[in-house]
């Protein structure tokens, strides 16, 4: 023990009969709180994939171009340390709210959200004022390498890429997409023939084209 520690305001929850914690982390301390993985280790000894630099740049540009309406989901991480949770009280909801003390000689490892963490660090260099904003962080207790690897696998197992047509339908930043939607709204024939929710038309559908094909 170094005698130094992080103290985070958290909400305590239960999942799979185990405690976990949710906090809000200022973007400015993300790099300090979550160092990058050691890529000299063999893949079977790590709990994360290698960083895709092109993906980092895309995410960073997204933040920089949309500083007033970017959106990020939570980062998920595991804590390998002897932590102490101090509840605000002993009555009802007070038992779930409190402070989490994490020794600085412990380690925090990102299991989901590594690209977001690195991209935000890149964006901060261009726009330092972002350091005062926050991102949600979900913290699980690290019970070993296998558990951390399983968390990474489970969190990424169910991810599904959105169909291009549905992305176009919901994306209000793509100017060509907005033009495409405006054309569909103005042409009644297209309204009847365009399928909006997928890249392929269902077998029994009476639609003839997808929104993506019109785009």
Image (cartoon, grey):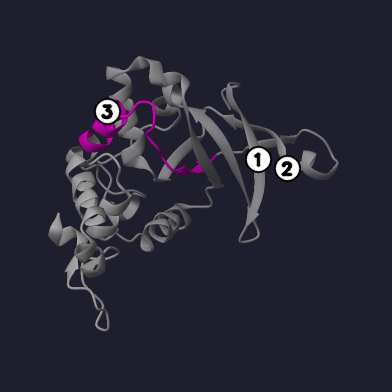
Which residue is most to the bottom?
A: 204
* Disc nearest the viewer among 1 and 3: 3
Residue underneath mark 2: 96
Compared across the picture, whether 160 is left or right of 141 comes to left
* Front residue of this view, candidates 103 and 201: 201
Q: Is residue 37 visible?
A: no
In the structure shown, which secondary structural element does the residue marked by tag 3 occupy? helix
Q: Is residue 57 visible?
A: yes
**Is there a contact, CB below 8 Å, between mark 2 and mark 1?**
yes
In the depicted structure, whether residue 24 falls above or below residue 133? below
Residue underneath mark 3: 65
Compared across the picture, whether 42 is left or right of 1 comes to left
Mark 1 closeness class: few <14, some 14–19, many ≥20 residues within 10 Å: many
Q: CA distance from mark 3 to mark 2?
A: 37 Å
Residue 72: x, y in percent? 41, 39
Residue 120: x, y in percent? 34, 29
């Amino acid at each position: 023990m170094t005698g130094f520690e992080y103290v985070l305001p958290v909400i305590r929850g239960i999942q799979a009969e185990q405690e976990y914690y949710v906090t809000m982390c200022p973007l400015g301390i993300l790099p300090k709180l979550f160092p990058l993985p050691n890529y000299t280790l063999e893949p079977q000894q790590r709990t994360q994939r290698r960083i895709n630099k092109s993906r980092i740049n895309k995410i960073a540009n997204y933040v920089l171009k949309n500083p007033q309406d970017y959106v990020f989901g939570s980062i998920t991480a595991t804590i390998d340390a002897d932590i102490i949770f101090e509840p605000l009280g002993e009555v009802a909801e007070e038992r779930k709210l409190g402070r989490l003390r994490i020794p600085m000689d412990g380690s925090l490892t990102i299991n989901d959200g590594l690209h977001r963490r690195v991209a935000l660090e890149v964006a901060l260099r261009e726009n330092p004022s972002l350091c005062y904003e926050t991102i949600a962080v979900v913290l699980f207790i690290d019970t070993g390498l296998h558990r951390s690897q399983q968390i990474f696998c489970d969190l990424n197992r169910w991810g599904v890429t959105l169909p291009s047509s549905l992305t176009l339908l919901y994306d209000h930043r793509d100017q060509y997409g907005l033009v495409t939607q405006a054309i569909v709204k103005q042409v009644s024939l297209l309204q009847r023939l365009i399928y909006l929710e997928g890249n392929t038309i269902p077998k029994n559908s009476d639609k003839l084209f997808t929104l993506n094909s019109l785009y």
